[in-house]
Each structure stands twice: as C-alpha cells, then as structure tokens.
C-alpha cells in the first residue's frame, strides 16, 4: 500500500489550468475529438461584505478508500491498483453500463465516444517509478501536492490551525 | 454456538457477487478457517450482468468473470462446482447436496441468486424458450442469435433484463418484437411519460412493440421442419406471427427450493436483519435471495441489483467473521433504494427511487429535444423532497455528459430524502 496521497489546497489555487493541460498531455486526451477531460478546473464567486472573492478548484477522481464505483462495477473494469492504491479503469473490460456514474459521489465518471468510462488514474504509470502525477508536477503554486500521508495531514492540520487566526 | 461446530467450515451457497464478496470479507476480517463454496455452475464464477453482452457479441467468455484478477483459490478452500443443493437442515447445521453429500457448517450464507419465471407462456412440445440469467443461458442465447436461420425474435417481458436481451438481439441484427401485458415498458422503474418516449425511440430503431397484449397460443410453425420452422405465436388479439426464437424475460424468483418450508422466515426472499442474519442461528443470506431494508419504503424488499449483492455479501462476511471470533458484528447494511441505468443503442435511461405518482406527490417534467426528465417530489419531514427521478437521453453528446453527473447527484439527493425520514417511507 502506498504511503503517498494527492492533496489539493484551494487557498493556493489560482485557476491557471496548467494541471488540466498537463493531464491532457499525459493521457493523450484530445478534447476536440470528444474525449473527456479527467481533471476539471472550476471557479466560484462569493460576495461577502462588499468584497467579491473567487475560489478556484481543481478536481479529479478522489480514489476513495471505500470507493462506491468499485462495488457498482459489474464487469471488473474498475479495480484498485495494488502499487499506488489508485482506482483505475481498464477500458477494454468496460461495458458502458454507467453504474459507476450512479454510484460516484463526486460526478467523476465520464464516457467517451466508444461508450467506455474514462477517468483519472492518479498517473499510476508515473508514480510507480517515483514520479509525481503530471498535474502535481506542473502546478506552479503548490496547490496540488503528492506527499507522504502524514506530511499531507500535517499540512492540513496547520491550515486548519491557521484558520483560527483572524 | 455448539462447540463441535466451531471447526466446521463456513459454507457459501452460490458463487456470484454476494458469495465472492462474503468470502473476501471473511478473509479481510481475519477468518483463517475453511471456506467451502457450493455452486451448480462451474468453478469459474461469472456476472449475470455480463450475459447479455456476451450473447450480443460485445464481449467474450473470458470477460464474463469480473474476478479474473483475484486469486480466488487463495480465498476459498474448496469449490463444489456443478453441485446442486438438495436441502438444508438448519437444526443439524447441514446442507445436503443432490449427490447425497452432507456438508456441516459453522456459518452458512445463502447466496443462490434468482431464476427467470415465465408465468402464462404456453408449453410447446419440442421447443424450450430461451431465458437469460446463467452463463449456460447466455451460451444458448448466443448460439441462437448467431444461427443464420434466426431472424425474428419475440422477447416476452418489459423488464430491465428484457431490454438487455433486446439490445443483444439488435446487436446481432435481429428483428425484435417486445411483448408485455402492461401499458408501458419498465413498469416498476419508469414514469409512463418517460416509458412512452423510450418506446418511441425503440420503434424508431425498428423494434415492434406489442404492449397490453398476451400470448394465447404457440405451436411449431411447420410440422415437417420443427427445428427449422420456428414458432407460430398467436396473441390475445387473435393475430398470429412467426418467430425463430422466443426469449422469456418476465421476472425472477429467488432460488430457494432447497429451503424446507418454515425453516427460515421468508416472504418474497429470505428475511434478514441489518447484518444479513436470517431467522435461523448461523444462517445468513445476501444478494437476490435476501429481503433487506429498502429505504424507499422502510420495509424489507428484494432489490436485485449487483451493487446490493456486493455490499450485502460483504456485510454478511464481516458479520460471520465477527461472530466466529466471538465479537459482535459492527458495520450493518445501510439499506438501499431501487435504481438503474439501461442503454439500448444510443438511448440512455436512468431511474432512481420510486417513479410512480400518487395523490401526495408533485411531478415536474423537464423536456428538451434530446432529453426528458421526470422529477417526483413528496413532502417529507416538512420539506419538498425528491423521491423519484427518471432521465432519458437520446443521441446528443452534451446531454449524455450531463446524464453522468446528474444521475449520481439525483441518486444521492433521493437517498438523503429517505435517510432524513430514518428509512421509513410511510
Ligand atoms: C441479463 C441481466 C442483466 C442484469 N443487469 C444488471 C444491471 O445492469 N445492474 C444491476 O445492478 N444488476 C443487474 N442484474 C442483476 C444482477 O446480476 C444480480 O442482482 C446479481 O448478480 C445478484 O448476485 P447474487 O450473488 O445474489 O446471485 P447470482 O450471481 O445469480 O449467483 C447465484 C449463484 O448461486 C448458484 N446457485 C443457484 N441455485 C443453486 C442451487 N440450487 N444449487 C447450487 N448452486 C446454486 C448459481 O450457480 C450462482 O453461482 C442483471 C441480471 C441479469 C440476468
């Protein structure tokens, strides 16, 4: 089991799309040919006390521990990669039944023109050789990181602690 | 538990999603004793969901085993394949097989799934209609659909499985007639408005629909060439039509003929508690044989879905392991709601919850040229809560993208509506 995890810090994200582009490059995604993007960047405006704040969010598959999609898939197309713990799809086994789309709490599964499911595989082809996922590698602000689980938790705790300082 | 039973194996009846997941959960929870599986099929398990894809030629036999990657030989000690279960003696903690073998168990899981039923279809001497559940059924259907003499197929039934059969037939280039007693297809899961639109799409793809109709009689079309001539089917309307094959997909019943009457509390399936325990000590049930909590009604009901079989099997496996280790089981089965996605060619249909209208419900219809949505609301805990959802998408790629994110979101919203009510739909 891996001790590394992919984390996202919205406080650092500037919505530059570098992660989405790196992901397309890594996975040979041709959006113009109808292929689905694995990583989505979203922008939200929030007006508070006369000030408009924009939050940028970069999202892809969460690779959940108790992944509902794994339970829903009746064809064995979805499995957990033993080395990286990523939930990966073997498109040659996907029957396009959309059961994973119904099960996923985050709206991640998308289907290509060939009817099979496509999604982020946490770049397990890179991480198994010690490289960071492509989106993390390119992120210019450190909003996306690929860290030891305990280091990621320590970062999260520090951010939470900082939120008390007004 | 009687001390002499502790050394007996855990016996799993069936080798489908429920049993495989129970076996894996037993091991994950640290159970190191023997696990014996009994199945009337072969040693290689398969997913019934994949049978129509196999029959329709989209996948090969190898791909029908979704656990091909898993080393099941390391999980299960003994697979009694091609072994039919004759009877169950809960007092003696024994399963009797058709060949006379008796298997004692410490814990037993009944996970024998279901079989197709065919109420009302006339018997025809020398012809056995096709059905679709097991791998053997799928092989027969595939053989029939690849035969050159087969051109016209009657699919009797309008259930999810009937539509899957229909898709397999279309994939093989057959002319299909779909026959149903009810006014619309998918009576249990589609609102009539959505069903009607789905029917129009099927007709546009060359399917002949015979709804609100029954079969009055069936006979070999040609007495001289019975095998070649197909069947002449007479409908309730008096019309007669020739078919090369008939597939019955009118519904299923749990495989429980080996359970003596009164041995286990049963209704439409075996009644289980939240740890999948039946009314008899040490006997559990999961999957299509189990009547577990349906959150949409608050009552126990068989909801024959793959994911339910997986999760119920896992829950039973964990509970068996806990009890065998002298602990109380902890993670109960949370319950589920009916839901489904069906595709026929480029038409996609999803249903969640209860799409039926009644006096207490408010219905909202959202229609575009390429998609139709029906949302059904009910007042629950003082709020207007979504309790049913249908979506039908035709062709346009943009709407198909919306489909994928929307069905998941609606499923969760409806689950929340029912959970807010504490699983009590009354
Ligand atoms: C064509 C088709 C399409 C489907 N599509 C979907 C879908 O899209 N989505 C979805 O969620 N669900 C779908 N389902 C339903 C889904 O397949 C079931 O809910 C699920 O597989 C149930 O698993 P199970 O382990 O309870 O039963 P099964 O997988 O049926 O396993 C039962 C096991 O018991 C054995 N057995 C039965 N009787 C005996 C006996 N007397 N003696 C010995 N062994 C016995 C069988 O050999 C088998 O190993 C579909 C079903 C079919 C047939």
Image (cartoon, coloured by chain):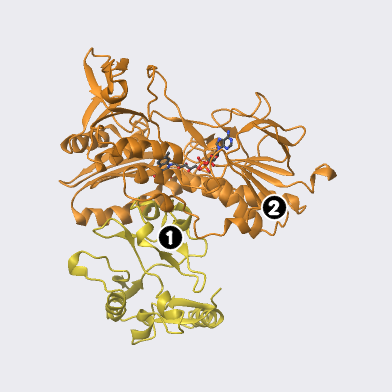
Chain colours: A yellow, B orange
Exactly how many numbered labels are in the figure?
2
Residue B145 position (above or below residue B229): below
Would you say B79 lies left or right of A10 here? right
Query: Label 2 belongs to which residue?
Result: B321
Q: Position of residue B261 (x, y in %)?
A: 65, 23
| Quarter-of-image position of residue B32 | bottom right
Q: Nearer the viewer, mark 2 or mark 1?
A: 1
B153 in relation to B327, above or below: above
Q: Residue at x 65, y 37 (%)?
A: B278
Residue lying farthest right? B3
| Residue B6 location (% of width, % of height) | 79, 47
- The answer to whether residue B424 shows anywhere in this view is yes
In front of the other: B299 or A21: A21
Q: Which type of secondary structure does the marked residue at label 2 adopt?
A: helix
Residue B131 lies in quadrant? top left
Q: Position of residue B129 (x, y in %)?
A: 37, 26
Q: What chain is tagged by disc 2?
A: B
Task: Classify mark 2 as within 8 Å of ligand 1 or not, answering yes or no.
Answer: no
Q: Which residue: 23% across, 14% down? A: B237
- Could you tell me which secondary element the residue under label 1 belongs to? strand
Q: Chain of mark 1?
A: A
**Mark 2–mark 1 distance (CA, rounded to whole Å):** 26 Å
Q: Which mark is residue A78?
A: 1
Relative placement, left or right, of A57 versus B172 is: right
Residue B420 appears in the picture as rendered: no
Is residue B251 toward the left or the right of residue A82 in the image? left
Name the quadrant of the N terminus of chain B.
top right
Q: Looking at the picture, how far across and down is residue B292, in whole percent?
A: 56, 39
Q: Nearer the viewer, residue B298 or B111?
A: B111
């Amino acid at each position: 089991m891996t001790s590394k995890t992919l984390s996202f810090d919205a406080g650092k994200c500037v919505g530059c799309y570098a992660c989405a582009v790196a992901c397309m490059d890594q996975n040979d995604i041709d959006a113009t040919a109808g292929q689905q993007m694995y990583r989505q960047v979203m922008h939200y405006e929030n007006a508070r006390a006369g000030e408009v704040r924009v939050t940028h969010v970069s999202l892809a598959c969460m690779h959940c521990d108790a992944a509902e999609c794994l339970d829903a898939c009746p064809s064995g197309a979805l499995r957990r990669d033993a080395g990286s713990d990523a939930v990966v799809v073997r498109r040659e086994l996907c029957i396009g039944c959309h059961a994973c789309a119904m099960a996923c709490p985050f709206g991640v599964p998308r289907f290509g023109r060939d009817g099979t499911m496509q999604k982020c595989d946490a770049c397990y082809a890179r991480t198994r050789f010690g490289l960071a996922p492509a989106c993390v590698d390119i992120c210019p602000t450190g909003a996306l990181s690929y860290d030891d689980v305990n280091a990621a938790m320590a970062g999260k705790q520090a951010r939470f602690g900082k939120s008390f300082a007004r | 538990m009687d001390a002499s039973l502790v050394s007996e194996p855990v016996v799993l009846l069936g080798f489908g999603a429920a049993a495989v997941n129970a076996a894996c959960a037993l091991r994950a929870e640290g159970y190191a004793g023997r696990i014996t599986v009994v199945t009337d099929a072969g040693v290689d398990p398969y997913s019934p969901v994949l049978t129509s894809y196999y029959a329709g030629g989209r996948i090969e036999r190898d791909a029908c085993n979704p656990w091909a990657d898993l080393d099941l030989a390391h999980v299960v000690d003994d697979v009694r394949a091609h072994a039919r279960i004759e009877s169950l003696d809960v007092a003696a903690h024994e399963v009797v097989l058709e060949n006379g073998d008796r298997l004692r168990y410490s814990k037993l899981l009944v996970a024998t799934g279901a079989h197709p039923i065919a109420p009302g279809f006339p018997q025809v001497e020398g012809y056995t209609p096709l059905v679709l559940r097991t791998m053997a059924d799928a092989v027969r259907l595939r053989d029939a659909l690849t035969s050159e003499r087969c051109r016209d197929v009657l699919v009797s039934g309008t259930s999810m499985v009937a539509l899957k059969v229909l898709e397999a037939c279309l994939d093989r280039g057959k002319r299909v007639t779909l026959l149903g007693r009810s006014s619309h297809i998918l009576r249990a899961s589609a609102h009539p408005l959505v069903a009607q639109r789905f029917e129009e799409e099927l007709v546009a793809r060359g399917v002949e629909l015979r709804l609100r109709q029954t079969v009055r009689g069936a006979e070999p079309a040609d007495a001289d060439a019975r095998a070649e001539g197909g069947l002449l089917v007479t409908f309730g309307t008096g019309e007669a039509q020739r078919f090369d094959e008939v597939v019955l997909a009118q519904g299923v019943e749990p495989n429980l003929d080996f359970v003596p009457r009164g041995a286990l509390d049963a209704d439409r399936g075996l009644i289980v508690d939240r740890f999948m325990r039946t009314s008899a000590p040490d006997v559990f049930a999961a999957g299509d044989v189990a009547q577990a909590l349906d959150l949409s009604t608050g009552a126990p009901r068989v909801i024959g879905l793959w994911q339910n079989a997986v999760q119920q099997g896992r829950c039973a496996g964990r509970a068996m392991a806990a009890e065998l280790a002298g602990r109380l089981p902890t993670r109960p089965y949370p319950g589920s709601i009916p839901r489904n996605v069906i595709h026929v060619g480029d038409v996609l249909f999803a249903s969640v919850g209860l799409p039926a209208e009644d006096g207490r419900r408010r219905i909202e219809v959202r229609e575009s040229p390429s998609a139709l949505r029906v949302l059904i609301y009910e007042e629950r805990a003082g709020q207007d809560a979504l309790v049913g959802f249908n979506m039908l998408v035709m062709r346009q790629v943009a709407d198909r993208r919306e489909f994928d994110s929307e069905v998941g979101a609606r499923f969760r919203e409806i689950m929340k509506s029912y959970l807010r009510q504490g699983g009590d739909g009354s």
